[in-house]
Image (cartoon, rainbow, N blue to C red):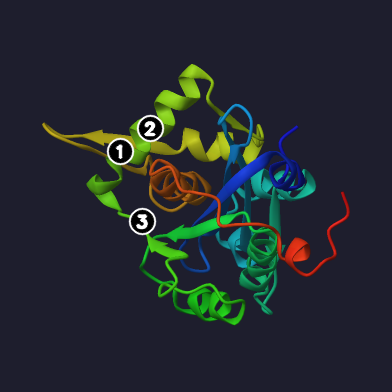
Amino acid sequence: QITLDYLLAECEVIVVGLDGGGLDDLYGFCALGRRKTTKEWLAWSHAWCHQSVLRRRKSIAPILEQAAADGELTIVDDELDDIAQMIDLIDRINSQGLLSAVSADPAGLGEMIDGLAEIGITPENNQIIGAPQGYAMMNAIKTAERKLTNGTLLHCASKLMAWCVSNLKIEPTATAIRATKQNAGDAKIDPVMALFDAVTVMSRNPEARGPSVYETRGFLVI
């Protein structure tokens, strides 16, 4: 089973993809790693939502409650500690020298930018990357599709992610495609968009950033 712990043990580099809207949406998180040995991509996904979503979107409340029971979704209250929890996960990845970058939709990142800066992750050190959106995301969509098909992108088999993929609509034009929702409102796709954000950076073949801080501090036991 692919978990975050599994990625930390098996991967040489990890990209984190983020996608979140307002309090009526999910906040999607994807850790996408490249395996040390086979170079396969391994994806672990999670999502957060405010408890108000369960009240406003009663038609999907049972799906979200089941996802929370399965450990695939965290429901937060008015303390809104979702970003703090994500920062903790990113800090854990970064502290082991595995984080290449955090990739996200540049819109609405203010609070996340502030939290990442507190752990030393900033646009200035190239560890925060704005992922192209709309039709500019076409390469990430096609890359994910091909790698899933040929078995070089493995995922955690999240039921929540499967539901979000079912909500996805691919709109083609003469020269491009883009991902959007099948239906506005109740259809949630944020975790899938977080995967595409991560694929955007991983497809550039990022290098590992270096040894664990615990190794440099003399705490690593082999």
Residue contact at pointers 2 and 1, CB within 8 angstroms: yes
Give the mark, 3 or 1, whose residue is nearer the N terminus.
Answer: 3
As drawn, is 39 to the left or to the right of 126?
A: right
Q: Residue 85's x, y, as percent?
A: 69, 67
Front-lying residue, 53 or 207: 207
Front-lying residue, 64 or 100: 100
Front-lying residue, 192 or 30: 30
| Residue that mark 3 sits on | 131
- Residue name at image x 41 percent, y 38 percent: 168
Please identify the quarter of the rendering in which residue 143 is found.
top left
Q: Which mark is residue 174?
A: none
* Count of numbered circles on the image: 3
| Residue that mark 1 sits on | 139
Q: Residue 163's x, y, as percent?
A: 56, 36
As drawn, is 193 to the left or to the right of 71?
A: left
Point out the residue furthest to the top here: 150
- Residue name at image x 61 percent, y 71 percent: 83
Between the C-alphas of marks 3 and 1, the distance is: 11 Å
| Residue that mark 2 sits on | 143
Q: Residue 154's x, y, as percent?
A: 59, 29
Q: Residue 146's x, y, as percent?
A: 40, 24
Point out the residue furthest to the left here: 174
Q: Is residue 31 visible?
A: no
User: Tag 3, which secondary structure?
Assistant: loop
- Amino acid type at circle 2 is Thr
Reply above or below: 176 against 69: above
- Residue name at image x 47 percent, y 68 percent: 22
- Amino acid type at circle 3 is Ala
